[in-house]
Image: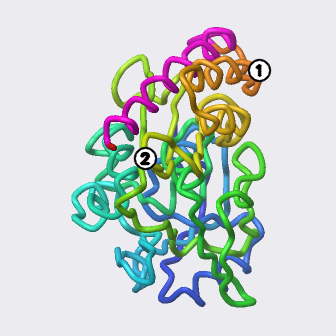
Amino acid sequence: MKPAPFAYAKARSLDHAVELLGSDDSARVIAGGQSLIATLNMRLDAPRLLVDINGVSGLDDIVERGGQIEIGALVRQADALRSPVVTRAAPLLAKALPHIAHPAIRNRGTLGGSIALADPAAELPACLLALGGEVEIAGADGRRAVKADDFFRGLFETALGRTEILTAIRVPAASADMRYGFAELARRHGDYALVGLAASARADGARLTDIRLVYFGVGATPVRARVAEAALAEGGADGLDAAIATVASELDPDDDIHASGKAKKHLAGVLLRRVVQQMQEAA
């Protein structure tokens, strides 16, 4: 299929991009285009204007400062995967990136685009939430930061205003006492996950504290399993089993052509056991 006709504009700067978005209420930002082009070709979206931000400077850096890793919105997923800064200081992202689609997609797809799209089956939104990160947003009124806990609001719905642009994500740099886990189950490598789990925790001896368990592929947004977090934090010999038992009651995934909601709940428990084992073995 071919997309509906549209106009194209290449933004010269961030301010110019915001101005262009304000000129047409159907305008869309294009960066990597790995999701947008598909929706245009299937005519699931029909903007009259595409605003290309690939020429905007300052959006493709990966820097560590102030105890945080800042990744520009235009950083390609393949570049983040190869980055020694990401490998060392954002290991959860390093664990998740190889699971995203295939090399050809990662070569063009951007971190900012994945976060801004907020596909509930995608890896990066769940990782951002599991890390307690934040996004930086630019608009006509300047820049603002939004915590990941407040950013994902519904199915493909975020805190981004219509004329705003996500410019960067920031996550806490890893410290020696932090532990991370990631796992997903897909029909084939590169497919969207039936169920996935991204997790972070702080090691306190043999115990895990400050636990964040975020599932993807099981709801309209990434889903924090807060009851399971609490059960796991209580520890003890039965802590993990208790946490797994709560997952089925916390999650409410829909049936689809790949798996029933009941099957997804079971798989969520399987992934929790695997991810906790990853974090414990890292101690």
Say whether residue 267 is magenta: yes
- Asked whether the viewer can see residue 37, the reply is no
Q: Position of residue 190 (x, y in %)?
A: 36, 31
Coloring basis for residues: rainbow
Which quadrant of the figure has residue 234?
A: top right
Q: Residue at coordinates 47% horizontally, 88% vertically from top-left? A: 12
Left or right: 170 in relation to 255: left
Q: Residue at coordinates 42% horizontally, 25% vertically from top-left? A: 274
- Disc 1 residue crowd, few under 14, some 14–19, many 20+, Cα 10 Å: few
Say whether residue 183 is magenta: no
In-front residue for pair 15/222? 222
Q: Position of residue 225 (x, y in %)?
A: 68, 36
The mark closer to the camera, 2 or 1, is 2
Which residue is labeled 1 in the image? 249
Query: Vertical placement of 30 versus 58: above or below?
Result: above
Q: Position of residue 93 (x, y in %)?
A: 39, 52
Which residue is labeled 2 in the image? 205
Q: Residue at coordinates 53% horizontally, 70% vertically from top-left? A: 8
The part of the chain drawn in magenta is: 257-282
In-front residue for pair 203/140? 203
- Disc 2 residue crowd, few under 14, some 14–19, many 20+, Cα 10 Å: few
Query: Vertical placement of 11 versus 6: above or below?
Result: below
Chief SS of the magenta region = helix
Do the residues bearing badges 2 and 1 touch, measured as CB atoms within 8 Å? no
Q: Amino acid at mark 1?
A: Ser
User: How many marks on residues?
Assistant: 2
Q: Amino acid at mark 2?
A: Gly
- Asked whether the viewer can see residue 153, the reply is yes
Q: Residue at coordinates 60% horizontally, 41% vertically from top-left? A: 214
* Quadrant (top left/top right/bottom left/bottom right) for the C terminus: top left
Circle 1: element type: helix
Q: Along the polypeptide, which appears first: circle 2 or circle 1?
A: 2
